[in-house]
Amino acid sequence: MGRGWTWLCLLGGLAAAPQAAGAADTINLIDLAELSGSGATVGTNFKNGADLAVDEINANGGVLGAKIAITHWDTQSNAGVAKALAEKALDAQPYALLGPGYSGSVKVVAPLAADAGVAEIMGGEAADLTRAGNKFLFRTSFGQQSSMPKIARYIADDLKAKTAAIVYVNNDFGKGGNDSIVKEFDKRGVKVLLDDSTEAGQADFSADAIKVKAANPDVVFVYLNEEESARMLKELRKADVTKPLVGETTLIGQKVIELAGDAANGAIGHVGLTTDAPAPALKAYRDRFFAKYHYVPDHNGIKGYLAIYMIKAATEKMGKIDPKGLPDALHGLSISAAKEPGILLDLTIDGNGDLDRESFIGRVVDGKQVITEVLPKLNP
Amino acid sequence: MANFVALLIAGLSTGALYALVAVGFTLMWQTSQTINFAQGEFVMLPAFFMLAAMNRGAPYWLALAVGVALSLAILGLAFKRLLVDPMLRHGVLPLAIATMALSSFLKESVKTFYSAEASPFPSPAPSSDLKVLGVAVSWQSLAGLIAALLAVTFLQLGLSRTRIGRQMQAAAQNPTVAQILGLPVERLILYAFLLNAALVALASALVSPIYLAKFSNGETLGQAAFIAAIVGGFNQVRGAVVGGLLLGVVENLGAAYISDAYRDAIPLFVLVVVILFRPNGLVGRAEERTV
């Protein structure tokens, strides 16, 4: 009887063994995405990019024979909701967590994922995300510590600006970017005439545009989330601001161009990820995304897509499906687009989870993003 | 000085939109004791009616007509017959709670059946500027200001100079006596709801090019209009106008000259001050039901 109970317990234990992380036939991923609220553009594009990647990989046999199953949970662009969802998601023992896209939400989710030993591949861009010593957090785009020096150099050296007005969003993303760009401007002798904070989800930017006009800077640096960028561009146009408008991907992304219309023309941005880049893999991705979703993806769509292929590359490097080994496999990983076309551009992940990759300077011309300069990897 | 003028005009333009929506609040309160906490969503929704029509190839003017027609039917007639009439029997509070539920329902419906993302919305006004007192002012801001003020002016004239308007005022002041005198009180109340539906449709067409069409637009607008109605005087249409314009200007000037960080707090501060020192609003009167 005792031996029978022992076998029964053993069988029960095996049956109860975690299925979520990586049973032989399924890699379970959970994506915490801003599917509603002020970040709906960010999260929806990230989700669509990730789904596309999952479909492609599964159609080609999966990863080491295992299919990927992904579920998307709506953080409502709210850090409190993101935290609650992360706790629930980690209880399900996913192979990896994806997202969130908002840096403020990443800050509350990342410690939970780290405690659980689960790799988190997210879309946040705030500089301090990867400076907290978290070995389980990975970017899908440049951090502000990489992008702001490039932007400041362009403004000071190429545009020859001596003064600047900054308009930024008052959240972790915006404040991090503002801190970084102010430091970089100071290093390059660009005087900041206006440092204007705005609110996430803000609808009326007329006062901010008038303040920019009154400051009369050589250049305007706009660092807002996508929808707010579109509203700001419209107000700057209405206020007859004719100075160069410079930003990051969130200023000249495809969704912003669609929302701002003609007001986006002339805007300049440093873009880490764009389907307008002179890279065949990116153009092919854009065509596949358009065929599935009937619109052109923005950088968030590329981030979601890349996140899945980063997991694929790291898992194949390990040679086994091992969620505990995934973070170490990602650190120091160099992925060549020639060998893994899904990664779109050659990519290296450093020990902090930051990325090194070439990037671009783009300008909006007649409603389209045109790449005017290619910037190489920091460490080619 | 040029900046002040630009801020003033921009503030008046925003305030005019608040006034349009706030007038609807006061109309419904005066005629049927309805506090509509879904008023912000009533402004959000017609934009999506119009977008749906434009997505099917309708030109702007036709989409606008469709938006107004659907707004009258759903946000006017259906709202009154299916929600207000059944709930009002149980008192003002249950009706107010029901409108809160309606607000969530409308928001989530648009998010689910249309999109959670913002959509661009065309403006009937040109995107160029003209010079006013030496300041570049956009046609869009001016068009919004002029359209809103014209609508409110015609509304006031209609209510005070036409037979139906005077009947609506009579029914609002004393529905029992009005009924005794043979006025069709229920129909007159319905007209108030239809007027509100038309006003919110107009507000939607004016605000959506600036705010972009998004399911969550109603939150900001509803709150601003509610504050404007209280600040101006909940029992006076002209109070809603004064409150709306004042709020728009104070918001803009406060954001520019005091602090951006307190942009959302400034209207609430104004509200508290007005409630403390003039609880009936700046132009409202105590215990008087006047449309």
Image: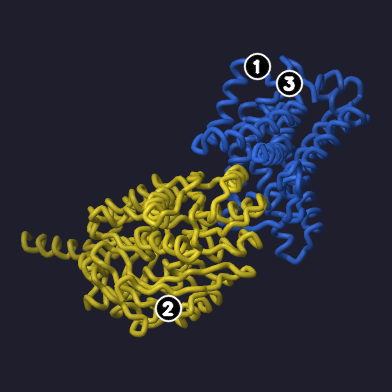
Chain colours: A yellow, B blue
Residue at 39% in and 77% down = A345
Q: Are marks 2 and 1 on the same chain?
A: no
Q: Are marks 2 and 3 on the same chain?
A: no
Which residue is under mark 2?
A56
Taking depth in this image into account, of A173 and B173 the one nearest to the observer is A173
Q: Chain of mark 3?
A: B
Q: Chain of mark 2?
A: A
Image quarter where the C terminus of chain A lies is bottom left
Q: Residues within 10 Å of mark 3 (few under 14, many from 20)?
A: some
Question: Between marks 2 and 1, how big is the CA–CA gap?
Answer: 65 Å
Taking depth in this image into account, of A372 and B266 the one nearest to the observer is A372
Vertical position of residue B83 compared to residue B277: above or below:
below
Question: Between marks 3 and 1, how big is the CA–CA gap?
Answer: 9 Å
Q: Is residue A348 visible?
A: yes
Which residue is under mark 3?
B283
Taking depth in this image into account, of B150 and B167 the one nearest to the observer is B150
Image quarter where the N terminus of chain A lies is bottom left
Q: Position of residue B34 (x, y in %)?
A: 69, 30
Q: Secondary structure at mark 1?
A: loop
Question: Could you tell me the amino acid type at mark 2?
Answer: Glu
